Image (cartoon, grey):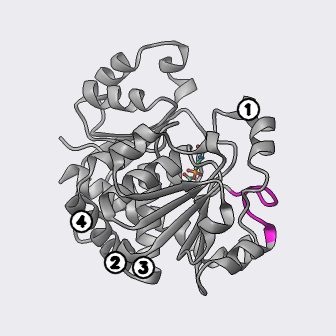
């Protein structure tokens, strides 16, 4: 039984397989000879909002031959306090796979343990593995192998997306720079566990210099709304804008996992100048989700 709960649990061969299949599935969209989810019904259980992840999984499951039901966490008994492990043991007897977006990483892990069906992490407070796989796919599609690249993450360096980038750096050997205030950087313990070439700094300009990719995410992640005022103040200078892009390599990619808050983590003109890349990145969520689905059921 395979799950995709964290980049940490993938090995290099798994990542290469998923990214390779995503390229084929992208090329052959609408003509997939394999329907690995035929006869299956998958559930999406989401406790947080989503546009890209929800739609890419719903469409992807259908295009691989499966059926899908969407469950808002608040609309099922989970929202009234039914334990995860009971929800898991019920759903595990009714559906063939789960895509789950929630708060604690331990909740998706507990679900996977009790449900006995392939379980995919569609974002937790700690990780967003499907996003980072699509991001790496996008970088490689546009610029070739990621191994020799410098990826600079700007903003909340301790958020779920940044954390998944740190695990990916440990697996794939590219240089990851995280430009963030000290309090919003990954912990020493996480860096030690991940390994890899990861530099954390408060010096935004040094981090951006000669980078191949400038990447950002929202300053205030879902679930952190109570800290919004403080976070906006602390992160105010950690913005991707034209001045920062000038420091990066000529032709550097500017990427954003979306949704974007213009004038906060990214300037409006920079966002629009790089919209082609950013929306290719969003589209690639679909192709990579399908490869992830194929991989978990293989
Ligand atoms: N990037 C991302 O996961 O977007 P959604 O929150 O819309 O799914
Ligand atoms: N860090 C963001 C990612 C959104 C896709 C959040 O958790 O809200």
Picture residue at 41% right of the left edge, 41% below the top: 190
Q: Is residue 137 visible?
A: yes
Mark 1 lies on residue: 227
Distance from disc 3 to disc 2, alpha carbons, whole Å, reads 16 Å
Quarter in which the N terminus is drawn: top left
Q: Position of residue 286 (x, y in %)?
A: 45, 63
Q: What separation in Å lies between label 1 and label 2 (alpha carbons)?
A: 44 Å
The residue under the point 41% across, 15% down is 83
Q: Earlier in the sequence, mark 1 or mark 2?
A: 2
Work out whether mark 2 precedes mark 4 in sequence or the reverse, and give the earlier one: 4
- Mark 4 and 3 residues: CB-CB less than 8 Å, in contact? no
Q: Which residues are magenta?
A: 260-268
Residue sitting farthest toward the bottom: 250
Taking the image as shown, residue 197 lies to the left or right of residue 264, namely left
Asked if the residue at label 2 sits under 8 Å from ligand 1, the reply is: no
Which residue was labeled with disc 3? 141
Place residue 149 in its image quadrant.
bottom left
The front one of 192 and 60 is: 192
| Distance from mark 1 CB to nearest ligand 2 atom below 8 Å | no
219 relative to 3 in the view: left or right = right
Residue with the mark numbered 4 = 17
Count residues near mark 2 (Cα–Cα under 10 Å), then give few for <14, some for 14-19, many for 20+.
few
Q: Is residue 98 magenta?
A: no
């Amino acid at each position: 039984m395979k799950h995709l709960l964290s980049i940490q649990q993938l090995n290099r061969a798994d990542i290469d397989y998923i990214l390779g299949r995503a390229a084929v599935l992208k090329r052959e969209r609408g003509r997939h000879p394999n329907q690995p989810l035929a006869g299956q019904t998958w559930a999406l259980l989401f406790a947080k909002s989503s546009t890209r992840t929800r739609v890419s999984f719903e469409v992807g499951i259908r295009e691989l031959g499966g059926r899908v039901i969407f469950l808002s966490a608040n609309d099922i008994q989970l929202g009234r306090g039914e334990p995860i492990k009971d929800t898991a043991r019920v759903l595990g007897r009714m559906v063939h796979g789960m895509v789950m977006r929630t708060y604690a990483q331990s909740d998706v892990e507990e679900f996977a343990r009790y449900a006995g069906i392939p379980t995919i992490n569609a974002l937790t407070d700690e990780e967003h593995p499907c996003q980072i796989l699509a991001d790496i796919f996008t970088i490689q599609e546009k610029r070739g192998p990621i191994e020799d690249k410098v990826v600079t993450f700007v903003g909340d360096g301790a958020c779920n997306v940044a954390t998944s980038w740190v695990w990916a750096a440990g697996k794939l050997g590219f240089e990851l720079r995280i430009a963030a205030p000290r309090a919003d950087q990954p912990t020493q313990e996480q860096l030690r566990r991940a390994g890899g070439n990861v530099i954390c700094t408060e010096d935004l300009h040094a981090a951006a210099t000669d980078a191949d990719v400038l990447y950002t995410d929202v300053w205030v992640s879902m679930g952190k709304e109570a800290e919004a005022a403080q976070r906006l103040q602390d992160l105010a200078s950690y913005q991707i804008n034209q001045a920062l892009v000038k420091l990066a390599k000529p032709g550097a990619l500017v990427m954003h996992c979306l949704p974007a808050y213009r004038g906060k983590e990214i300037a409006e003109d920079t966002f629009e100048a790089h919209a082609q890349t950013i929306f290719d990145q969003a589209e690639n969520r679909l192709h990579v989700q399908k490869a992830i689905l194929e991989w978990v059921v293989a």
